[in-house]
Amino acid sequence: MASSGTRRWRIAATVVAMLGLLAAGAPAASAADGDTPADVIAAFSVENAVELGADEASELEHVPDAASFGTVHRVHAWSASLIAGEAGDPVSAMDEWVAPVLSASGEAVGVYRVWRETPDSDATFAGVDGDAATAAALTEVAGGVTVIEDPTIAAWYTLDAGVVTPVGSARFDDIRVATPIDRAAEIVSARFAQNVRDAAPPVGLSYESWMWAGIALLVMAAVGVGFVVRRRRLPA
């Protein structure tokens, strides 16, 4: 039986997950997983990628070479239940999709993102960056494999046949190699709980006070991540 302390941390982690997803501004997907919807396909635009790359050349120096896109992947997030330590329903599908930007020679030069601002709206451009390493890694992910983003540590994973695998690097501080989902749930839950503990205010405040203070700090961080990723829009 879990101790009261463990239950408290699981509750705190669940709240962080739920508030973080809301704060990041990406609502849970209303469309079922499967074939990429037509409005999503239409939102992937080489012209937009080139225009943005030219406008922000210092940051996206290779994106003006965009010629096509690789496989489109729907973005998933860790579910609140997984962050609470339960792997039964490990991910939540988001109304976001990503694809590697490819040059004319087929080289991966960036990651392009589209999203639906509301569940019933059409997908629109959400952001593009020159992370060629992640883009190259995404080209190796087969269509239909679940792709997970964890923006709190700038990490990407796949989930396939109950195994979580880092995408593109073994540098991540928790899931470094292919890991069964039950073990991945323990690792992610422990990290989120540690984040709450690290965000605690000075000794002297009640458990509830510093727990909620930690949650507030993590939510503010999630807001910042969501703002940077999703609000880098094309000039009017």
Image (cartoon, rainbow, N blue to C red):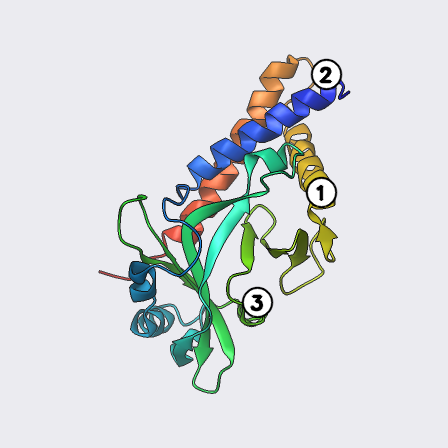
Amino acid type of disc 2?
Answer: Ser
Q: Residue at x 52, y 28 (%)?
A: 216
Q: Residue at x 56, y 35 (%)?
A: 80
Q: Residue tagged by mark 3?
A: 141
Amino acid type of disc 3?
Answer: Val
Q: Nearer the viewer, mark 2 or mark 3?
A: 3
Q: CA distance from mark 1 to mark 2?
A: 22 Å
Q: Residue at x 71, y 42 (%)?
A: 182
Q: Residue tagged by mark 2?
A: 4
Q: Residue tagged by mark 1?
A: 182
Amino acid type of disc 1?
Answer: Asp
- One can see residue 62 in this view: no
- Measured as percent of width and height from the top left, residue 170 is found at 71, 61
Vertical order, 21 against 67 (above or below): above
Figure disc tally: 3
Tell me if 18 is positioned left or right of 122 in this view: right
Toward which corner of the image does residue 40 lie, by quadrant? bottom left
Tell me if 137 is positioned left or right of 39 in this view: right
Please rate how many residues cluster around mark 3, counting C-alpha atoms within 10 Å: few if below 14, some from 14 to 19, many from 20: some
Quick one: label 2 or label 3, which is nearer the N terminus? 2
Q: CA distance from mark 3 to mark 1?
A: 22 Å
Quick one: label 3 or label 1, which is nearer the N terminus? 3
Nearer-the-camera pick, 23 or 41: 41
Nearer-the-camera pick, 84 or 50: 84
Quick one: label 1 or label 2, which is nearer the N terminus? 2
Report if the CB atoms under discs 1 and 2 are less than 8 Å apart: no
Vertical order, 16 against 179 (above or below): above
Tell me if 145 is positioned left or right of 101 in this view: right
Where is the N terminus found, in terms of image quarters? top right
Please rate how many residues cluster around mark 2, counting C-alpha atoms within 10 Å: few if below 14, some from 14 to 19, many from 20: few
